[in-house]
């Protein structure tokens, strides 16, 4: 068993990390001071659960991949912990899928109103082929604004070929749901089917067309499709991130019928350093360790910083000189 280098994206940037293949799974290791091993693209890779952790750990220790901790999660709908290793409860923003009508009837009036508004204002939503025409629209959306949700947007400034390559992953098990206005792509969802889950990998829309509510229209179409396919859950990322429990994104998910579904993530220490790391729960990071009020204050400061920076960058040089 040999250690190889594979390319992954971290915060929108490509980087090379060491990897090994164990039982048909590509395991990678990341971390500066503490090396954490986990399955590559674990949330979007089907049938890659760790069924026999003890044997898996033994193979990992013999592989040559330097790691202090092994982590893996138990994919919903199997929510009860199967193993006795240290766990942290992770969460999805998910809709338990039954029928489209059941989801629609549970939505608050405002969410249904926004979907109808999208239709009235001329938004057309359909499944689109992943081709150059779609990628050109995605490229335009990605390069609309350097800041999204109060922080630098990872895909801003990337060229056409980079955007195409980065969105071409898992196309064999994906649907691209596209929202158009007068023939122009104004929003899209990349929906990946993983075991019994339909998981949003990307959801973006042009801010310039916010008034047409393309995001609501996209989610409605995606819910219609997932109900037809008979999956167990429709997943939209995390519901909450660590102690960051209140945000406009959380509220948007709640208004569109998503709820918090908790599932266990296991942490198995492999070294003394790993044992300390797991015992202190340092894997939570700043978002999980800082008290909620402190975290919210820091996030507000960050949002104001990037808002001012964006505003300064949009001022024309001549106007700035006149001031």
Image (cartoon, grey):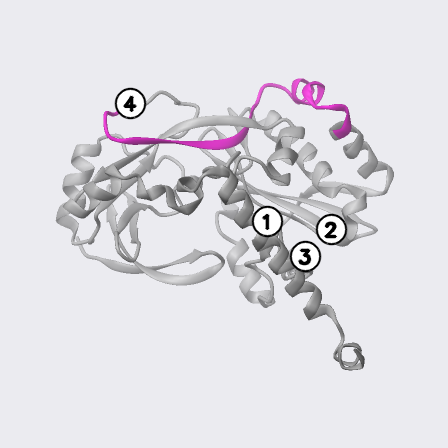
Is 116 located above or below residue 159 in the figure? above
Whole-percent x, y for residue 291 in the image? 45, 39
Whole-percent x, y for residue 197 in the image? 49, 31
Tell me, yes or no, whether the highlighted magenta stretch contains residue 210: no
Crowding at dot 4, Cα within 10 Å, few <14 / some 14-19 / many 20+, comes out as: few
The residue sitting at 49% across, 43% down in the picture is 294
Q: Tell me the SS state at disc 2.
A: strand
Query: What residue is disc 3 on?
Result: 141
CB atoms of marks 3 and 4 within 8 Å: no
CB atoms of marks 1 and 4 within 8 Å: no
Instruction: State the CA–CA distance, disc 2 to disc 4.
Output: 43 Å
Q: Is residue 233 left or right of residue 87?
A: right
Crowding at dot 3, Cα within 10 Å, few <14 / some 14-19 / many 20+, comes out as: many
Query: What residue is disc 1 on?
Result: 300
Quadrant housing residue 191: top right
Give the residues drawn in magenta, as a range: 82-110
What label does residue 151 carry, if any? Answer: none
Query: What residue is disc 4 on?
Result: 82
Query: What residue is disc 2 on?
Result: 186
């Amino acid at each position: 068993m040999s250690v190889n280098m594979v390319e992954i994206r971290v915060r929108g940037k490509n980087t090379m990390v060491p990897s090994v293949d164990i039982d048909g799974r590509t395991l990678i290791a990341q971390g500066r001071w503490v090396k954490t091993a986990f399955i590559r693209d674990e949330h979007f890779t089907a049938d890659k659960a760790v069924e026999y952790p003890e044997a898996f750990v033994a193979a990992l220790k013999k592989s040559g991949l330097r790691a202090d901790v092994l982590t893996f999660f138990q994919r919903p709908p199997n929510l009860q912990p199967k193993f006795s290793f240290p766990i942290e409860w992770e969460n999805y923003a998910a809709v338990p899928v039954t029928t489209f009508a059941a989801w629609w009837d549970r939505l608050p009036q405002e969410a249904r109103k926004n979907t109808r508004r999208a239709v009235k204002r001329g938004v057309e939503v359909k499944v689109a082929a992943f081709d150059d025409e779609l990628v050109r629209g995605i490229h335009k959306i990605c390069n609309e604004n350097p800041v999204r949700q109060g922080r630098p947007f990872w895909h801003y400034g990337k060229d056409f070929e980079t955007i195409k390559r980065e969105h071409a992953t898992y196309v064999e098990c994906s649907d691209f749901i596209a929202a158009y206005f007068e023939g122009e792509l104004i929003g899209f969802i990349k929906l990946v089917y993983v075991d019994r889950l339909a998981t949003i990998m990307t959801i973006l829309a042009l801010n310039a067309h916010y008034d047409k509510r393309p995001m609501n229209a996209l989610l409605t179409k995606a819910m219609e499709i997932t109900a037809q396919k008979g999956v167990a859950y429709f997943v939209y990322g995390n519901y909450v991130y660590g102690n960051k429990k209140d945000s406009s994104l959380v509220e948007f998910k709640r208004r569109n019928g998503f709820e918090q579904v908790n599932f266990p993530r296991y942490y198995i220490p492999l070294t003394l350093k790993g044992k300390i790391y797991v015992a202190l729960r340092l894997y939570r990071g700043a978002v999980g360790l800082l008290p909620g009020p402190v975290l919210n204050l820091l996030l507000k400061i960050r949002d104001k910083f990037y808002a001012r920076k964006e505003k300064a960058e949009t001022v024309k040089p001549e106007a700035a000189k006149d001031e």
